[in-house]
Structure formats: structure tokens, C-alpha cells
Amino acid sequence: MKSKTKLLIVLLAFLSTTWITYGHDQVPAPPQDKPILLVNGTIHTVTGATLDQGQLLFENGKITAVRQSIEPPSNCEVIDVSGKHVYPGLISAISSIGLVEINSVNATIDIGELTPFNPNLKAQVAVNPDSEIIPVTRANGVLTAHVTPSTYQGGFIAGKTAVINLDGWTTEDLTLRAPTGMAVSWPRDPRLSGFHPEDPGNDNPAKAEEAYTKKIDELSDFLEEARAFEKAKAKGKSPLNVDLRLEAMIPVLNRELPVHIFANTARQIRDAVRWAESQELRMVLMDGTDAWRVATLLQEKGIPVVIGGVNQLPSRRWESYDVRFTNAAKLHTAGVQFAIAYAGGGPVSSNERNLPYEAGKAVAHGLAPEEALKAITIYPAEILGVADRLGSLEIGKDATLIVTTGNPLDIRSNVKMAFIQGRPVDLSSRHTQLYEKYQQRYLQQ
């Protein structure tokens, strides 16, 4: 009996240590309880004019006034932001924040399932509100994330995506809108050699083509099964065994929910567009490494693109070094609606704090600065269906914004204040705590 008690104590001690390791110390802010007026700052509305020495008022979590001069209401907190810049909070349009903590520790990874078709899964349910990565990311101005479940082998439906705010006690507190899309990992291009034993790649081109076609057929068959389920349900025929997977596909078939298809090569993108059109689905292209190669097709079909990273190496040996850097500028020139994400289709949440610098890289390679800013604010908000709440500083939208020392795309700029739905956000993180800790070491010498 004593040995069992000792074992239980050891187990509880281990679990408590693990919990502390993977939980941040920042306390989520309470709801806004009084009006806040920001004065004397440069207000970057994104969709309208920039106001020098402007003012911005927000109450009950909503922006209520943006103009040159505002009369403070009673009980208003006035914050002087002289010399500072006010921007809408940045949006990470492809994110695994809260789904992945440490890539090398499987217990902290909950980005996807092993079975091929999981449309009933909800990304926001798996998010860890205590992730250490959340405060690190929001400290650099990224206040909202589009969490996307993922599969690595391709040809699978991973689940429903969601837009979350990066502050809250629970997943319900975090969730801004869900679902926002259905994540689909397009089958791997058969001309590429694979990472998985079952992927024949270049070793057997004929077999690779066959496997590629088979996976697309499996996707189509699953949709046909979902359509049959929907028709039976509409006729009042109740199936003996209700399939939650098929039930979850009904909003997709009715075009209420878009499919977010992760595809990279030009062939993958063309095939995905044809498939979505043949299935009469709304499509958003995610990742889109070769999107610039098929920009005309995307523009003609009205398919938006969320670019999965700008500051990336070329995918092919013969490509120019800047082929990924110029993707955004080429899509903009072609008239394609686009947004910029840090990186797509994998567990890279620990570096999503670098999102503004991805947009900055695009500026250095041909994209206009104002377009780059929109690519991480209003454009992702429009693509994800949350432009009524986020993406710009307009009356009626959520007071989700940042106060910075300069342009957030500039690595020299720092975020000094942040608000999510009017709540002041704690900008400390594990990074700042370690900085302060080791600063003391040198002060003691």
C-alpha cells in the first residue's frame, strides 16, 4: 500500500512539473470596464486615411470613434501615445499556435489525427490556452490566429479551422469565430520524391501517378458519400448510424464553409482548382508556393491565396533565390486576393512571432508597404470571414490593436501596448522573463 502511495506522489509531482513547464504565467485580462482614449499618436486605419496626431476611442471592447479630435466621455482613461503608432492587431492566417508546443515532444502536438477523413474535428477545441507560445507571439503584435489542423501525408480532410484571439482563460474565451473553413491537405505531387515509405516518388513515376489519382478519387468519393447522406437527411430518412464526419461536410457542400486546400506546386494548385470547381465548392488556397505561376487561373476563378511564408528558400535547385520573396508582389500585380502567413502546413508555431517580418521581406522584393501591411491585417480578415471584427481601425470593429514605436514590418520597431477587444494585454513572455533574469546576472558583476 505504501509503495502505491509513493508511486502516486511521484506521478502527481511529475504531472505538476509538466503542467508548469507548458503553462505561461500571464493572467488573461478582464473585460474592458471603462472607455479608453488613445491621443497624439499616428493612427494607421489600414483601410482609410492615416491620422497624424490622431485619436482613437474604444468602449466595451469596440472602437467607437477614430478622428483628429475626440471629446473624452466620463470615466474615460486617456493614454498619451505621443511619438507612437497605432495599428490593428496582426493576424496569423495559417497557425498551429496552441496545437503544437514542442516539435520533438509528441505529447505537446495535437495538430491532426492519423485517420484520413476528419471533417468533424474542431481545431479550437484542441488549443492550449496556456501555451508558452501565445504570449511570445502576441508580444510582437500578432493578436489573432487562424488555427488549422493538418495532415502530413496529403489527400486528407484534416478538420475545421477557427479564428482565435491570443488571450483568454479557456478555448471558449479564445475563439472569435468557428468554423471558418475545412482544411484539406492536397495529395502530394507525384513528381516529387516523398518522405513516407508508401510514397513512391520519382523511383516509380507510373506508380506515383496512380497513387496521386487514387487519393483524389478517394476525396471525391467521400464527398459523394456526404451528398448521399445530406439527401437522405433532407428526405427525413434517419440513418441507423449517424456519421459525424458526413454531417460535418454538409456546410461545405452547401458552400456555407470554404475548403482551405493546402497545395504548393503548380500542378497541385491547378488540379485542386479543377476539383473544387467540379465539386462546386468555395476554395481558398493555402501555402501556394507556386501560386505566382498560376496567378491568371487564380484571378479568373476568384480564388484567394494565403501565402505560407515569404522568407523561404527556393523549392527547386534551378529557381532564382528570390522566387519565394516575390510571390506576394506577383500575385498582387495579377489581381489575386492574397494574405501572408508565417509558414503553412506544419508545426511552426514557435516562430509565428516573425509574421510581420515575412511581410517586410515581401516589401524588399517588390510589394508596396501598404499592401504588405494589409496582407497581415485586413486581407486575411476578409479571406477568413472576420473583416467585420478585425483587420482595420474602424468604428464598430473590435478594439484589437497595437501601439508601436514604428512600422511593425521593421524589425527595429517594438510593440509597447496591445489590446484585444479593449482588454490590455500583458506583453511579458518567457523571452522577456529570461532577458530580465540574465540581465541581473550582469548587473551583479
Image (cartoon, helix red, strand yellow):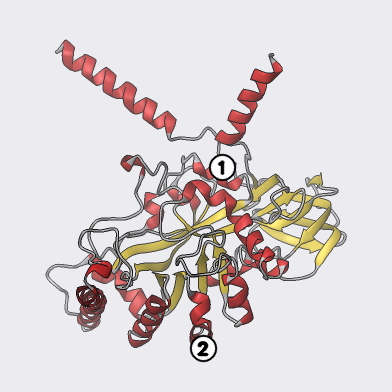
Front-lying residue, 95 or 234: 95
Identify the residue under disc 2.
300
Nearer-N-terminus badge (2/1) = 1
**x, y percentage for residue 374?**
65, 67
Q: Tell me where residue 228 sits by quadrant.
A: bottom left
Amino acid type at circle 1 is: Val
Which quadrant of the figure contains the N terminus? top left
Q: Is residue 387 visible?
A: no
Instruction: Report which residue position mark 1 lands on.
Output: 136
Q: Residue at x 53, y 51 (%)?
A: 352
Residue furthest left as drawn? 240
Crowd tier of the residue under label 1, counting other residues whose Cα lies within 10 Å: few below 14, some 14–19, many 20 or above:
many
Point 31% across, 42% down: residue:
106
Q: Amino acid at mark 2?
A: Glu
Q: Secondary structure at mark 2?
A: helix
Figure quadrant of the C terminus: top right
- Where does residue 212 sit, x and y in percent of width and height? 26, 74
Q: Quadrant of residue 346?
A: bottom left
Secondary structure state at the residue bearing disc 1: helix
State the count of labels.
Answer: 2
Q: What residue do we see at 42% from left, 68% from top?
A: 181
Can the viewer see residue 99? yes
Q: Mark on residue 277? A: none
Number of residues whose C-alpha sits closer than 10 Å to that of mark 2, classed few (under 14), some (14–19) or many (20 or more): few
Q: Is residue 77 left or right of residue 298?
A: right
Quarter where residue 193 is shown: bottom left
Q: Is residue 7 left or right of residue 419?
A: left
Q: Position of residue 187 (x, y in %)?
A: 31, 71
Left or right of 174 in this view: 388: right
Residue 120 in the image, given as x and y percentages of width and height: 30, 63
